[in-house]
Image: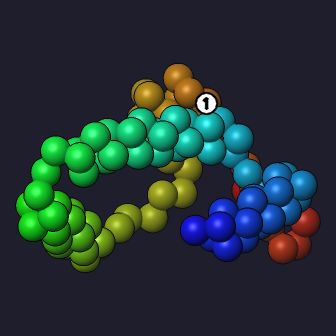
Amino acid sequence: LVASIATSSGSGSAYVKEGITNIRLGMLLEIATTIGAVIGAAVAIYFNNSILAVIFGLALTTTALAQRRKHADHTNVKGSTMAQKLKLYGEYPLKDGTKQ
């Protein structure tokens, strides 16, 4: 866990320095992660290990099935109204120096 945090922090700071990080999106995801961790800890206290294993297996299966769908090209997509309200759009630098 410590190695994962250290690696993520190092790469995250490099991406922020290069300007290819959406800070608003990172903050939104961090809030969701923290809330999920608190809820997960509370659930782990009250449920049996077998029930947690079944819930985890169902979550993994659902995620795997969702990944099998064909994804359309998202060029020039404005995003949802929630994404627009939170300003989760932006641009990123390409290898040739231009921005997309």
Q: Is residue 48 left or right of residue 99?
A: left
Quadrant in which the C terminus appears: bottom right
Q: Nearer the viewer, residue 87 or 34?
A: 34
Quadrant in which the N terminus appears: bottom right
Tell me if I can see residue 79 in this picture: no
Secondary structure type for disc 1: loop
Q: Residue furthest top?
A: 85
State the image quarter where residue 93 is shown.
bottom right
Residue 84, image x, y percentages? 53, 29
Residue 38, image x, y percentages? 39, 39
Q: Nearer the viewer, residue 9 or 84?
A: 9
Q: Which residue occupies 73% across, 51% down?
A: 21
Q: Is residue 41 left or right of residue 18?
A: left
Q: Which residue is mark 1?
A: 87
Residue 48, image x, y percentages? 11, 58
Q: Which residue occupies 31% across, 47% down?
A: 40
Q: Nearer the viewer, residue 47 or 83?
A: 47
Q: Which residue occupies 13% across, 51% down?
A: 47
Q: Nearer the viewer, residue 35 or 69?
A: 35
Residue 46, image x, y percentages? 16, 44
